[in-house]
Amino acid sequence: MTTALDAARLDAVIQRVADRLRGDWLLVGGALVALWLDARRVTEDVDLVGIQGTGADRLALFALAYDLGLPVEAVNSAAEYFVHRITDWRNHIELFRTGQSGRVFRPDPTLFLLLKMRRLSTRDLEDCLELLRRCRAEALAVDAPRLLTELASLAPADDSALAGRRGRLRAELEQIVG
């Protein structure tokens, strides 16, 4: 059973995480997009990573989802694998929400793009473009040279649609570099 989570429901879930769960959490994925970049966005899950990365963190998160009436699969800690592949990820997080017991962080624009660019589905590209619009509008820093290097290091795409999406992201990043 999947549940469509809109910005209002996601906001309530994230506030409950900050109020009821101890420690620090990193919010990534579609839930972050809905709360930070595009309130029209809906998602089926909340990608939350316990910054300490313990099994107890994950179990507490599942228990909270259950208490909130969400299916346990509505909270997804699988993003932890992708976050930890980026060696300096801890240097690229920013405080997003503070609660009674914990804090929720979000990736900075560079980390957000690093996390999205490997898969770069159509929705991922839309999220990246929305972020880059926000960065231009608010003068948010983006390490475009690093991102271009990472993009160039990816294995060649067998899928022409993926190659096209990568090309579109590359062109947007090249505009930042100038």
Image (cartoon, grey):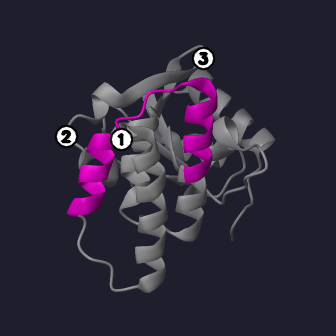
Q: Position of residue 38 (x, y in %)?
A: 71, 44
Residue denoted by label 3 = 99
Q: What is the three-letter code of the residue carrying label 2?
A: Thr
Residue denoted by label 1 = 144
Q: Secondary structure at mark 2?
A: loop
Identify the mark at residue 87; answer none if there is no mark.
Answer: 2
At 68% from the left and 38% from the top, the residue drawn is: 35
For residue 2, say whether it is visible: yes
Q: Are marks 2 and 3 in contact (CB under 8 Å)?
A: no
Instruction: Give the camera-side residue of 98 and 42.
Output: 42
Q: Of the residues under marks 2 and 1, which one precedes in the sequence?
A: 2
Q: CA distance from mark 2 to mark 1?
A: 17 Å
Label 3 vs label 1, nearer the camera: 1
From this view, report whether residue 52 is shown above or below residue 87.
above
Q: Position of residue 29 (x, y in %)?
A: 53, 50
Magenta stretch: give its range.
Answer: 129-153
Q: CA distance from mark 3 to mark 1?
A: 33 Å
Q: CA distance from mark 2 to mark 3?
A: 28 Å
Q: What is the three-letter code of the residue carrying label 3?
A: Gly
From this view, report whether residue 125 is shown above or below residue 135.
below
At 40% from the left and 28% from the top, the residue drawn is: 93
Q: Residues within 10 Å of mark 3 (few under 14, many from 20)?
A: some
Residue 6 is left or right of residue 75, and the answer is right
Q: What is the three-letter code of the residue carrying label 1?
A: Ala
Q: Are marks 2 and 1 in contact (CB under 8 Å)?
A: no
Q: Secondary structure at mark 3?
A: loop
136 is within the stretch colored magenta: yes
Q: Are marks 3 and 1 in contact (CB under 8 Å)?
A: no
Residue positioned most to the top: 100
Q: Residues within 10 Å of mark 2 (few under 14, many from 20)?
A: few
Q: Of the residues under marks 3 and 1, which one precedes in the sequence?
A: 3
From this view, report whether residue 161 is shown above or below residue 33.
below
